[in-house]
Amino acid sequence: VSVRSLSTVVHLRCRKSSIWSPREGWLMLRVVGICPILLRTATAFSSFANPSSPRALFTSGGIRGMAMQAASPADLRPLELHVTPPPAGGGEHRATVIFLHGSGDSGDGVQQWVEAATDGAFSLPGVKMVFPTAHMRKYSLLGPHGLQRVWFDRLDLAPAAPEDTEGIVKMAQLVKDVVQAEVDLGIPLSKVIIGGFSMGGGMSLHTALRDPDMHGLGGVFALSTFFAENSPTPERVAASIKEGKTVPPVWYAHGKADPMVKLAWGASTAKRLEVAGVPVTYTEFPGLQHDLRDDELMLLKTWIATRLS
């Protein structure tokens, strides 16, 4: 068995926490952060031995690229994008969905995850799917020297932990740049939807709701995520709404059996947004842990199709 195939199995097993009990899923919180790092390391070594591999030296330039990125703080470099073009025979590109991954994952990883969970059915005629990858940056949950592909830092996985406002603002600009690139291609802002899983869902909410320039988006979806208690986003969007501005609707989903991001955290965040005046469709999924599942994604697909129709 190759190093790459072993590392891929480890990565998928770590990512799909629903195969563990709630207690085991919680314990995996401390382990899951290192799995993508092991995957990238194994892939880089494997690709170094086989330069003709389609993933040769990985997307960051292999071992050397990993070292360079690990040594660099989050900055304003453009995000790496993994793109699924509109399905063949579905007409011209008319809309775009931007899907942000969770902590430690990548655009490529969540793209494959969504496709596997839905058996390739998460697509719509004329709709391009874009999966950005966050930069490698400091992630305090992995210790004082921990590095991870995350949208912003967390001091603790709990609502009481203070929000990384600076990190969110920097990454929101990069996500906004991805949106703007679609608009520059001729796609109306109202035909662009952003969203994501876990931290990616939170990042999507911050980007779409904090920035008035993003209020014309077709919608935003958030899967298994939450806001810090001190997050100013609900108050900021409430102020915008009081000024008569329209904000994009939110599709919010959370698993009832999530052992990592507690159901109560997600429900509380959705409620805060509703109180602020944001139109929120909130759905809880029985038995769903910190994971993506076909029924959840297909319901999301229906909502996206409605928003883009």
Image: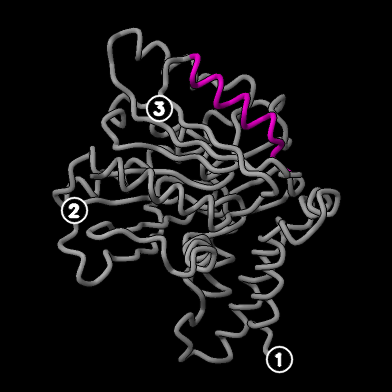
Query: Seen in the image, is 27 located left or right of residue 289?
Result: right
Marking on residue 135: none
Residue type, numbered disc 1 = Val
Q: Position of residue 219 (x, y in %)?
A: 35, 36
108 vs 23: above or below: below
Query: Seen in the image, is 296 located left or right of residue 218?
Result: right
Q: CA distance from mark 2 to mark 1?
A: 43 Å
Splitting the image into 4 quarters, where does residue 89 fall? bottom left
Specify start and end residues of the magenta stretch as a single range. 260-275
Say what secondary structure mark 2 lies in: loop
Q: CA distance from mark 2 to mark 3?
A: 23 Å
Q: CA distance from mark 3 to mark 1?
A: 47 Å
Say what secondary structure mark 3 lies in: helix
Question: Which of the image's four quarters has the N terminus?
Answer: bottom right
Residue at x 64% of width, y 75% of height: 8
In terms of sequence position, does the residue under pointer 3 or pointer 1 come before the other? Answer: 1
Q: Sort mark 2 into few (<14), some (14-19) or many (20+) by Cα contacts within 10 Å.
A: some
Residue type, numbered disc 2 = Arg
Q: Sort mark 1 into few (<14), some (14-19) or many (20+) by Cα contacts within 10 Å.
A: few
Residue under pointer 1: 1
Marking on residue 94: 2
Residue at x 38% of width, y 38% of height: 173
Marking on residue 209: 3
